[in-house]
Image (spheres, grey):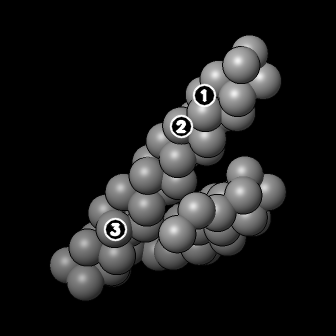
């Protein structure tokens, strides 16, 4: 399923908010933070991939 950049940016904002509000007190919190950071990374990567695809479509 493909999400628009707007939707991905919205999800990215939500992940950023969750990361900033998370306090790491134990291993579970640490795991949660790690998952959130991975999610953030994947969302950023997807935005870049979408932009590259959009650029290719525009040039063709």
- Which residue is at the far top? 59
> Is any part of residue 20 visible from this angle?
no
Q: Number of marks in the image?
A: 3
* Quadrant assignment, res 21: bottom right
| Mark with earlier residue (2, 3) | 3
Q: Residue at x 61, y 41 (%)?
A: 50
Q: Name the residue beneath numbered marker 1.
A: 52
Q: Does the rendering let one see residue 27? A: yes
- Under circle 1, the secondary element is helix
Residue placed under numbered mark 2 in the picture = 49
Labels 2 & 1 near each other (Cβ < 8 A): yes
Q: Relative to 48, is 27 above or below?
A: below
Tell me what residue is drawn at x 25 percent, y 84 percent: 28
The residue that appears at 72% across and 51% down in the rendered structure is 5
Q: Where does residue 13 sit, x and y in percent of width and height?
A: 71, 62
Residue 45 lies, in percent from the top left, at 48, 41
Q: CA distance from mark 2 to mark 3?
A: 21 Å
Q: Would residue 35 be found to the left or right of residue 14 on screen?
A: left
Q: Which residue is mark 3?
A: 35
């Amino acid at each position: 399923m493909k999400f628009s950049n707007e939707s991905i940016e919205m999800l990215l904002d939500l992940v950023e908010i969750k990361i900033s509000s998370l306090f790491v007190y134990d291993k579970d919190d640490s795991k949660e933070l790690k998952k959130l950071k991975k999610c953030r990374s994947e969302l950023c990567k997807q935005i870049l991939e979408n932009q590259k695809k959009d650029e290719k479509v525009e040039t063709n």
